[in-house]
Amino acid sequence: MKVKRVVRLSIFHALAASLFLSCSQTEEEKIAIKINTYVDTIVENVKHYPEEPVFDLAVFAPGAKYEVRVNDTPIVNRYGIDDNKYYLRFKKFSLNHAMGSKSIHKVTYRMIPLNKKSFENYDINDISIKSYNGLNDSKEIFLFEPLLTQKEDEESKEYIGNNFYNGSFTFQAKLPPYKRQIDWSESVNLQEQKNIEQEVLAIYKEIMHLYEEGDLDKLLELYKPVFQDEAQSVYATKEKKNRLGYKLDIKRLHPFFFKSQPKLDENYTLKFYANGKLVTLEKKSDSTKFYSESALSIRYEKDLDKLVDGMLVDVEHFNMYEKGIIPKIEQELYLFFYKPKGSKSLKLAANIYREEKLLNPVE
């Protein structure tokens, strides 16, 4: 069993670094060229403007799990993390790809306590939005910071002792009018479609088949518009592929290299977002949980020899592989679909990455 080199780089740097050519190309080298060309093409197609603002949402919530939406579009969901592990809960997310052409945007958030039943005095959780026109050119637009003290003020009464916290706020921001690969703001209202459930099930089955076959080419093609819009949203360039902290999460590509066992939970429900413009399948709500789960998951064996050299791999998975143990993975696929006006078929609009779950941990 060959052990691959592990590096912690952004996908753009990692894949570029992984390309080592020899006189006679191996199958792995051919795939490396394919991935490298794929990423370069995405970056080359990014349009540029005199002003290129990037709007980041930063969440600092060491005592909470959370969900954030912008314009009723899911941005991030940090509910699925193992309670028994320690995580530094400070994360930044670009909002640009969810902002569209509007100038007024609504952020909604939901928090639940981590490793305890309710929020307590002095819990620290805040959400901020900043605009960037460069690494050293930033401006804070909004800061949500509850005053968690022992005083009997109104905010503390609303927050302390609760097992969840909901809130919302609006902010004003305008983006350059660039053309998007995916623009669901002007798409069909799927709640008004008669046979929408059958259409959603059909496209889920198509995608499940791609994962089942490990069809790398078709999976790359499926996700390319999503990745293209993400790169465009931060105006990535060949010289600044990791611009302003943005990266295309390499872990989303891992399942593309394997034949997976997809499973669609029979106890699913249709869920609409973005005022009916986006649709997904979620598990029916569980009264013991405060968050939603995708109805679709996949399982696969992560044979690291099949990954391109330089791809980011969890240390735990790497250490297992060194010992001759292939990590067995389960991953939730949280996919969102839209239907452009005039189109007869649904298309992939976005996905929320959920952390891989290791099914055979080594004690």
Image: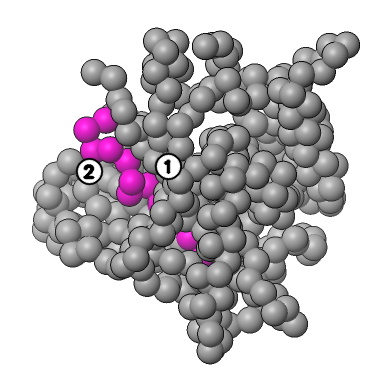
On residue 53, the disc is: none
- In which quarter of the view is residue 81 placed? top left
- In which quarter of the view is residue 246 placed? top right
Q: Residues within 10 Å of mark 2 (few under 14, many from 20)?
A: many
Q: Residues within 10 Å of mark 1 (few under 14, many from 20)?
A: many
Tell me the magenta residue range: 73-85
SS category of the residue bearing label 1: strand
Specify the principal SS of the magenta part. loop
Q: Mark 1 points at which residue?
A: 299
Front position among marks 2 and 1: 1
Q: Which residue is located at x 60 percent, y 35 percent?
A: 257
Residue 71 can be seen in this image: no
- In which quarter of the view is residue 15 placed? top right
Q: Which residue is located at x 21 percent, y 48 percent?
A: 113
Q: Position of residue 315 (x, y in %)?
A: 43, 19
- Label 2 vs label 1: CA separation? 27 Å
Position of residue 47 in the picture relative to residue 362 (left or right): right
Position of residue 153 in the picture relative to residue 302 (left or right): left
Q: What residue type is labelled 2?
A: Leu
Contact? badges 2 and 1 (CB < 8 Å): no
In the image, is residue 268 above or below residue 143? below
Q: In which quarter of the image is the C terminus?
A: top left
Q: Where is residue 100 in the image (x, y as percent from the top left)?
A: 66, 66
Taking the magenta stretch, the answer to whether it contains residue 75 is: yes
Q: Which residue is located at x 53 percent, y 85 percent?
A: 195
| First in sequence: mark 2 vs mark 1 | 2
On residue 114, the disc is: 2
Q: Position of residue 223 (x, y in %)?
A: 66, 51
Residue 339 can be seen in this image: yes
Q: Which amino acid does label 1 sit on?
A: Arg
Q: Which residue is located at x 88 percent, y 11 percent?
A: 23
